[in-house]
Every structure is written in C-alpha cells, then in structure tokens.
Image: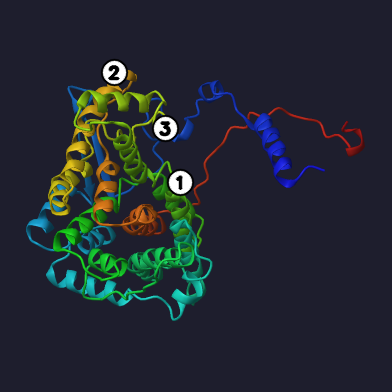
Amino acid sequence: MDNLFTRCDRYAQLCKETTSIPLELYDTNQVKKGLRDKNGAGVRAGLTNISRIVSFEDVDGNKVPCDGKLYYRGIDVEDLTRGFIEEKRFGFEEATYLLLFGKLPDPAQLDEFKKTLGECRSLPRNFTRDVIMKAPSRDIMTSLSKSVLMLSSYDRRADDISIENVMRQCLTLISIFPMISVYSYHAYNYYIRNKSLYIHRPRPELSTAENFLRMLRPDKQYSPLEAKVLDLALVLHMEHGGGNNSTFTTHVVSSSGTDTYSTIAAALGSLKGPKHGGANIRVVQMMKDLKANVRDVKDEEAVADYLEKLLNREAFDKKGLIYGMGHAVYTKSDPRCQIFKRYVGALCKEKGRMKDYELYTMVERLAPQVIAKNRRIYKGVSANVDFYSGLIYSMLDIPEELFTPMFAIARIVGWSAHRLEELINVDKIIRPAYISIGEMQDYEPLEERL
C-alpha cells in the first residue's frame, strides 16, 4: 500500500489532468485572467473614496504614462508626508485619521485620536501567555492571523457589525498589531531559535513607530531618525488604491456580513502570499546574492550582467525576476519609492552603509535598461516601494521574519477604512460569475466504473 505522500502525489497529478483549463479559452470566453486586461489593468470591481492612484495622463485624447501619484482621501501623499516631516511630528496617527474619517485632524482632534489609540494599545489579560506564546510559528504572519482570530473569543460583541462596534474593533486592531507582531517574533525567537525572551510593554504617549522599535529591541533604544523613517514607511504602506489583492479580499469578505476578526484574518492570508506582501524580502535576498556573485559591485558592466542573468533565470531563485522593479499599476515611477529614497541616504549614512546605498541606486538605474533590452514591455518599468523598504528595514535591524508583518501593521489601516466603506455603502454580497467550460458526463454506478 502506498504511503500518504505517494498517494497525494498521485491525487495531485490526477487533479492537474482534470482541472487544467486551456489558456485560449480565456480569450474565447472574454474572461480576464486574474481580473486584468491584456495590458495588466485591473477590472473595475467597485467604487472607493479612500485613495486614488494615477499612472497615466490624457494628452490630446491619448493615454500617456506619467510619473505616479498616490492620493489619500484626495490629498497627495507627497504633500502629506512632506507636511508632517517638515513640521517635525510623526505621521502614522494623522494619516490613519485621514483614511478613516476623510479629512485631516485639527490639533485637538489629533491629540484626542492619539489618546484613543494609546488607550486601545493593550491586549486582553493573559493573551500574550495563553495565545501568542503557545504554539509559536516560524511564520509570524501565521501567528498574527491566529491571534486576530482568537481575539474574537475575548470580545463579547465580536459578531456585531454595527459601524460603531466595527470602528471600535478596527481602532483596537490598528493599535495592537505592532504588539502582536513583535511578541510573536519574540516567542519564535525564544522557543524555536533558543534565544533570549523579553517582552516590553508599549507606552501610550509614544507613536506607533517608536513603540514598535521600543518593543522589538532588548535595550528599548532607537534614534530619532530611525523612528522617523519607520513612521514614514508605515504611512507609505497603509493604503494603495483599493485594487490590491488583500484590500479586495477585505471588501469581498466584509460583503458576506461576517465579523471584523474573520475579515482581517482573510486579508492577512492574502497579504502573506509572496506575490503580494513578500517582495521586499526577496529584494534583500537578491541583493545579498548579487554581492556574493559579483566580484566588484562598483563595476556597472558586471552588475548589469548579473541583472541579465536574473532575467534569463540563471541567477538567484531562477524565477526570471528582478525584484523591486516594475509595478502592476505604475508606469514611469512609484511615488512611494521616490519619497522613500529621499531618506534612505540619510539612514545609510547614519548606519555606515553608504556602499549599500550606492549599489541600490546603481541597480535602480540599470535594471530598467536591462529589462527594456531583454523583454517586450507595454509600459514603463521603474523601482517600486519594495525596492528600498527592505533595505530600510534591514538598517533598522528589523529581522526578515517581520518584513511582511510590517506591511500588515501599516495596511490594517487601509483594510479598516475599506471594511467600513463596504459596510456603509453596499448591502449586497459580492458574487462574481464564472463560466463553466467542463464537459458533461453521465453518472455510472460504482460497479461499472472499470
């Protein structure tokens, strides 16, 4: 008798043979695979006023690629980030208020909102011990999802989807995501890697970025620049146009009328996928491989040759990708990357990693040239937000296990805004149509199936 794994291999092959759909049938039936047209543009699946992406402009009736723009509730993210940085304050809480309530807070409203988030920044009694510390996972996203689902057991109004109650739940999740993520990492570090265990409590008067670094580090210490750059990273990752996979998941699951915890767990499952939330890890790993295989990383010709090997599936993971390059929506530039880049140099200088900065900027410049030379592309290719975010996280001594959870800590804000938007505006469950192309079969009695 075959063992279970052998049988499952056989079952998998049978499933592939009977389930595979010929590619040409998508065209024949006018079905957009992946909900995208041939140019990669997403199918319009809803309306939103949370955020907007601009990647093309109309020039004499023609659709022309342009420098990317990202708007939060109609405010240019470049203006938003420049504002709180020049005015020397942290922006995560302010941007969260903007996405949830549609306008920037005045000083009194911002102070009250910060106080509210600070009051929400605590876990249920013994939750860290009974949930986070038990059965820790190497995958912190798994631990985060488990914890979110378990929180429903501690909430007497878990299934109440009134806007008032969902708002309470969302503000609580926004406040405690950093705690759950960091504590889950410490549990993994202690129980699986046999390292030291330390659990630092957050301080209500500190910003989200400051508290994250305080809870993560053994000595609780961080520099003002470190906190400022991390705060900027969180703002730039918190929302992106509504059309990304995890936000769409939030709309779909919310439309079923289910609870907030199940909805956010579903969004986390989407973000966990390497095609969505894990690209910045791959950028860091790719750059490590580049440095290991290129003798002189200042030699542009040698670096370009390595990039060609990436595209030809001859280097790194042999997937044919230059990670951190290109985007499903943006054409000439990703505005988040452009904002990031202004502060990467300062952080590299503080951390003594200017050689890394020079290499990254070289790859950012060379990669589009190499891609244009080797691939047929329908729109511009430029560095995306993941290209520099992994470098920033590594300089902040954030372990790679926390890179995708960092994305979740920011994106929970966007998910919350979109969940509220779905519940307020739409009362129908999202139910897309699928065209059945399977052949009809007659039923055969068991004894005749030979």
Q: CA distance from mark 1 to mark 2?
A: 30 Å
**Residue farthest to the bottom, as pictured:** 125
Query: Are circles 2 and 3 on residues that touch, CB within 8 Å?
Result: no
Mark 3 — residue? 36
Q: Label 1: few (<14), some or many (≥20) within 10 Å? A: some
Q: CA distance from mark 1 to mark 3?
A: 18 Å
Q: x%, y% of residue 236?
A: 24, 51
N-terminal-most mark, 2 or 3: 3
Amino acid tagged 2: Lys
Amino acid tagged 3: Arg
Amino acid tagged 1: Gly
Q: Is 393 drawn above or below residue 196 in the view shown?
A: above
Q: Label 3: few (<14), some or many (≥20) within 10 Å? A: some
Residue at 27% of width from left, 74% of height from top?
Answer: 118
N-terminal-most mark, 1 or 2: 1
Q: x%, y% of residue 335?
A: 20, 41
Q: CA distance from mark 2 to mark 3?
A: 25 Å
Q: Provide the secondary structure element on which disc 2 rests.
A: helix
Please identify the quadrant where the N terminus is shown.
top right
Given residues 262 and 288, the one toward you in this image is: 288
Residue at 22% of width from left, 47% of height from top?
Answer: 71
Mark 1 — residue? 273
Q: Provide the secondary structure element on which disc 3 rests.
A: loop
**Residue farthest to the front, as pictured:** 295
Given residues 44 and 190, the one toward you in this image is: 190
Mark 2 — residue? 373
Of tags 1 and 3, the one toward the viewer is 1
